[in-house]
Amino acid sequence: MTLPLDRAGSVRPGEELDPAALTAYLKAHQGLSAEPTVRQFRQGHSNLTYLVTVEGYDYVLRRPPFGNQVKTAHDMAREYRILKALAPAFPAAPRPLLLCEDPSVIGAPFYLMERRHGTVLRRTLPKGYELTPDAADRLCRAMVDTLAALHQVDYRAIGLEGFGKPEGYVARQVKGWTERYRAAETDSVPAMETAAAWLAASMPPERGATIIHNDFKFDNVMVAVDDPGSVVAVLDWEMATIGDPLMDLGMALAYWIEPGDPEPLRSVAMGPTAAPGMWNRERFVAAYAERTGRDPGDLAFYRAFGSFKLAVIGQQIYARFARGLTTDERFATMNRMVAVLATEAVRIAGA
């Protein structure tokens, strides 16, 4: 049974690209003269992703969200740079083609990359698709293998030394994401304060440095339509850096919700991790340790931080809606997710 191809749809109102300006830029820099057809991959919550079809070719265009006020979180040049260096060494990284840092063209910097064809598995599996126990097993194995393979890329050998600051990474993350929460705060969420205080007081020593994706989840992984055990692409590299790989593992586990988790947490699941036949977190971690040879030890801090960070991201998105910077109705109830994830962070921490 094959999966449906991930397709683009119509562009959301208010998120249109200027076709004349884009045509002129592509003519000058890519040698393309026809006016492109632009559609949008509408599922994402952060950087915007468009399908640009021109002269028989498909390209993917990435730009920051409209109403963005967190400039450092949507650096197109940075995202382009890591993909350019990583693509030859990590086949799941799409190849970037063109970077435009001039915001006057379409209202913000953007880049073009190749289009990969496959499907992205989200919380609800495609209608009519049955995930067999064998397919679920291969899918979970593929997720672990892909994350492990990323963490084994020699970032120095591919020219990414200096891309991040691995020393003190964990401390900077705790401090930085706490500050981001304060800047985006709209409602009082006591669990966020409890989680932030516990994380600041419980930081483990650094456990090495690798390339980390920082948002590794099913939403950001594309699999082959005829084989869920084959990863076609890893997407959305906006938070990638050089840092402690266990922070990346903890973030992945924050998305890995199980059938036995508290109901409020299951209600905000973003992937099919609770579907019949899927691995639990314990098996995911064991497979990661086997694949990398890295002993993850006690992951409570990393898992709690993952849930806290997800809550902050949700709060940033909700703040954009609450402050009138976007009218996307998907963001109107994000504050509920913030409270659920903050509670989960506290639960994991035992604080």
Image (cartoon, rainbow, N blue to C red):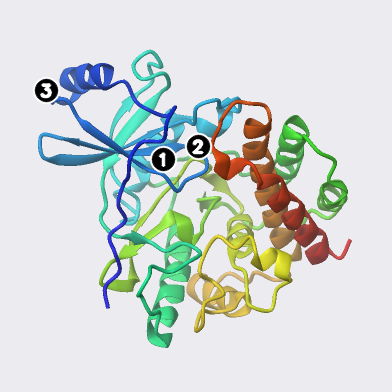
Task: Find residue 325 and report its horizontal and vertical position in percent.
Answer: 59, 26
Please tell me the numbered disc located at residue 82: 1
Amino acid identity at mark 2: Phe
Q: Element under label 3?
A: loop
Task: Find residue 17 and report its horizontal and vertical position in percent.
Answer: 34, 25
Please tell me the numbered disc located at residue 33: 3
Depth check, front residue: 46 or 268: 268
Q: Element under label 1?
A: helix
Q: Earlier in the sequence, mark 2 or mark 3?
A: 3
Image position of 211 with respect to 48: above or below: below
Disc 2 target residue: 163
How far, Cα to Cα, is label 2 from label 1?
8 Å
Q: Nearer the viewer, mark 1 or mark 3?
A: 3
Image position of 259 with respect to 179: above or below: below
Q: Residue at x 38, y 67 (%)?
A: 126
Please tell me the numbered disc located at residue 229: none
Image quadrant assignment for residue 255: bottom right
Amino acid identity at mark 1: Ile
Question: In the image as oriented, which residue stretches furthest toward the bottom?
Answer: 133
Task: Find residue 49 and report its horizontal and vertical position in percent.
Answer: 38, 39
Image quadrant assignment for residue 230: bottom left
Image position of 226 with respect to 184: above or below: below
Amino acid identity at mark 3: Ser
Q: Residue at x 20, y 42 (%)?
A: 58
User: Badge 3 local density, few (<14 within 10 Å), some, or many (20+)?
Assistant: some
Left/right of residue 90 with respect to residue 193 in the rendered view = left
Q: Is residue 91 visible?
A: yes
User: Badge 2 local density, few (<14 within 10 Å), some, or many (20+)?
Assistant: some
- Are circles 2 and 1 on residues that touch, CB within 8 Å? yes
Depth check, front residue: 132 or 181: 132
